[in-house]
Image (cartoon, rainbow, N blue to C red):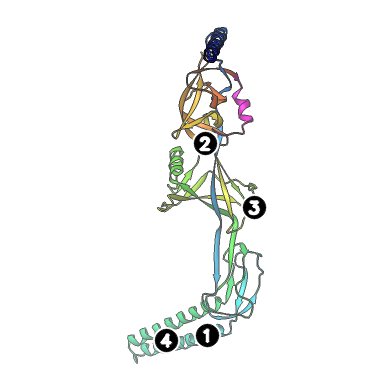
Amino acid sequence: MKSMFLRIAILASISLASTACEHSSAEGRAGHEEHGGHEEAHTVVATSALQQDVILTKKYVSQIHSRRHIELRALERGYLEEVLVKEGQSVKQGELLFKLLPAVYKARLHADQAELQSAEIKLRNTEELFKEGVVSDQEVAFAKAEKQKAEARVELAAAELSFTEIRAPFDGIVDRQYEQQGSLCEEGDILTTVSDNTVMWVYFNVPEADYLDFQDKQASVHPEGRQYLTLPDAKIELQLANGKVFDQVAAETVTVESTFNHETGNIHFRADFPNPKGLLRHGQTGTLLLHQTLKGALIIPQRSTFEILDKRYVFVIGEDENAHQRWVTVEHEMDDVFVLASGLEPGDKIVLDGVRQVRDGERVESEFRDPKVVLKNLKHRAE
């Protein structure tokens, strides 16, 4: 009896489960037919590739040098008798800066001048004796040579005396003073340095690829030679250490060194900046900003792209509203946008937001946004 009741209960359970499955299957078929047999299309935000002139900015770490920066050294040994300038003072060409004690050099000059007078007297006497036939012409030649030797000694002594006065070689600014008044200076000791800061030379390292790009864009060889390179449609600025941009702009023509550094693969460029207010000083550092205008560049937002195996792709939306994956080649990377070399045409409609939700060939519903408006509000980079 117990066994019979158990079999009846099992058969009843199987019957109920079968009925529930059939009901669920019928509901699923009805729901599928109700939606026309298709999955819902993803809703995405779309925009289009835009062609316009853009400014490409490249940044290079730079070192700032004075156009002329030289060391002033003692050319003779002696005590530093006078220091006539202060550190940081502006000086004019020829202005007296330092004076060594001249007594020894004055005495030497006077002695050599006396020797010259003696040689001149000896030459005159020898010439008189030659006229009388007392001495030969060789004696006259020897006396002339002695006079010339004495003249050379006087010139040397006068030069050594002049070396006791150290003057400014050009208009500039006196830097640190390394010797104080009363110091015994040896020949070659550095006294100070002088800098001409009217024009500053800003050196920056350029990678080989950039160097070749600049050469390709140059319309013609500079008339003064290949050591000069004119960058067309370029604006060269200098960003200082505090983040502010210097108020002067360099010329489009830069100077190029003759060799690459084989260790870094870079070559030195030099841009010349006017420095009318004297803000820039020798030894400063900064960042050189090279702005170049790209005519008719094709640009898209970075966030509209995605990367697969080091290749960059976008989803292009066709007239049938299907999204198709397309490979694009990036020529330049800028803040939030890519400048394309190939892959799209101006006006091609692409997925902007929702890239991760879309599959190749899938139908999408798109909300189009003007590319100019999109560019003004960009904040995000590529996925």
Give the amino acid at mark 2: Glu
The residue beneath circle 3 is 276
Precedes in sequence: disc 1 or disc 4 = 1
Task: Please identify, in this view, whether the residue under mark 1 or under mark 4 is nearer the observer.
Answer: 1
* Distance in Å between CA atoms under marks 1 and 2: 72 Å
- Asked if disc 2 and disc 4 are in contact, CB closer than 8 Å, the reply is no
> Of the numbered discs in the image, which one, if any, rests on residue 81?
none
* Distance in Å between CA atoms under marks 1 and 3: 46 Å
When the figure is inspected, residue 145 is found, relative to residue 67, above or below; the finding is below
The residue beneath circle 4 is 123
Q: Is residue 264 visible?
A: yes
Q: Is residue 50 visible?
A: no
Give the class, few, some or many, for how many residues have Cα within 10 Å of label 3's Cα (few <14, many ≥20): few
Point out the stretch of residues depicted in magenta: 367-383
Q: How many marks?
A: 4
**Is 237 situated left or right of 257 in this image?**
right
Give the amino acid at mark 1: Arg
| Residue 322: percent from left, percent from top | 50, 16
Precedes in sequence: disc 1 or disc 2 = 1
| Residue 8: percent from left, percent from top | 54, 11
* Distance in Å between CA atoms under marks 1 and 4: 23 Å
Asked if the magenta segment contains residue 374, the reply would be yes
> Of the numbered discs in the image, which one, if any, rests on residue 108?
1
Task: Please identify, in this view, whether the residue under mark 1 or under mark 3 is nearer the observer.
Answer: 3
Precedes in sequence: disc 3 or disc 4 = 4
Task: Please identify, in this view, whether the residue under mark 2 or under mark 4 is nearer the observer.
Answer: 2
Q: Nearer the viewer, residue 6 or 325?
A: 6
The residue beneath circle 2 is 333
Quarter containing the N terminus:
top right
Give the class, few, some or many, for how many residues have Cα within 10 Å of label 2's Cα (few <14, many ≥20): some
